[in-house]
Image (cartoon, grey):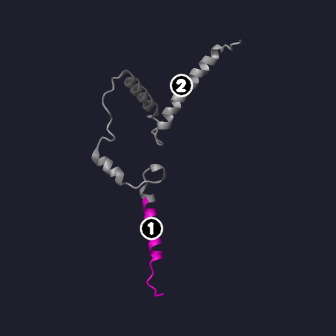
Amino acid sequence: QQQMEQPPHAVQEETRQSSQQDEQDVIDEEPLYVNAKQYHRILKRRVARARLEEVGRLFRQRKPYLHESRHRHAMRRPRGPGGRFLTAEEIAQQKQAAAGGEEAGHSDAPD
C-alpha cells in the first residue's frame, strides 16, 4: 500500500485555508458601511471578544441598542434600498413623486 505523504507546505496550505474561512465568516457578518479608519480596530475588537468568549470571561450580553430615544428615531426614519437612511433630497423626491401620482389619479371632470 502506498500512502501519500503530504509535503510540509500542504499542511500549511490547509491551515491557511481554514484561517481564510474564519476571516470569510467574519466578513460575512460585517455591515455594508463602515468607517474606513475604524475598520481595523473593529476587527481587532471582534477577535478579542471571541477570545474572551472561548475562555468564558465574557458574561454580559450586549443590548441591541444603547438609547431608546435614538432607536425610536432611527426606526421612524425612511430608508432606501439596502437599509441605508435616505437624504433630505431623496425624501423630497419621493414626496413629489407620490404627490404627482395622486394628482393624476383624481380628476373632477364628469365622465
Residue 42 location (% of width, % of height):
43, 32
Look at the picture and state if 4 lies above or below 101.
Answer: above
Separation of residues labelled 2 and 1 (CA atoms): 50 Å
Query: What secondary structure is found at the residue carrying circle 1?
Result: helix
Based on the displayed image, in which of its 4 quarters is residue 44 positioned? Answer: top left
Question: Residue placed farthest to the right in the image?
Answer: 2
Query: What secondary structure is found at the residue carrying circle 2?
Result: helix
Q: Is residue 1 left or right of residue 22?
A: right
Residue 35 location (% of width, % of height):
45, 39
Q: Is residue 16 left or right of residue 56?
A: right
35 in magenta: no
Question: Residue placed farthest to the bottom in the image?
Answer: 110
Look at the picture and state if 15 lies above or below 70.
Answer: above
Q: Nearer the viewer, residue 52 or 79?
A: 52
Question: Residue placed farthest to the front in the image?
Answer: 1
97 in magenta: yes
Based on the displayed image, in which of its 4 quarters is residue 4 positioned? Answer: top right
Q: Are marks 2 and 1 in contact (CB under 8 Å)?
A: no
Give the amino acid at mark 2. Answer: Ser
Q: Nearer the viewer, residue 25 or 71?
A: 25
Can you identify the residue that label 2 sits on? 19
Residue 65 location (% of width, % of height):
32, 41
Give the amino acid at mark 1. Answer: Ala
What's the magenta region? 91-111
Total residue callouts = 2
Q: Residue at 44% of width from left, 72% of height from top?
A: 102
Can you identify the residue that label 1 sits on? 98
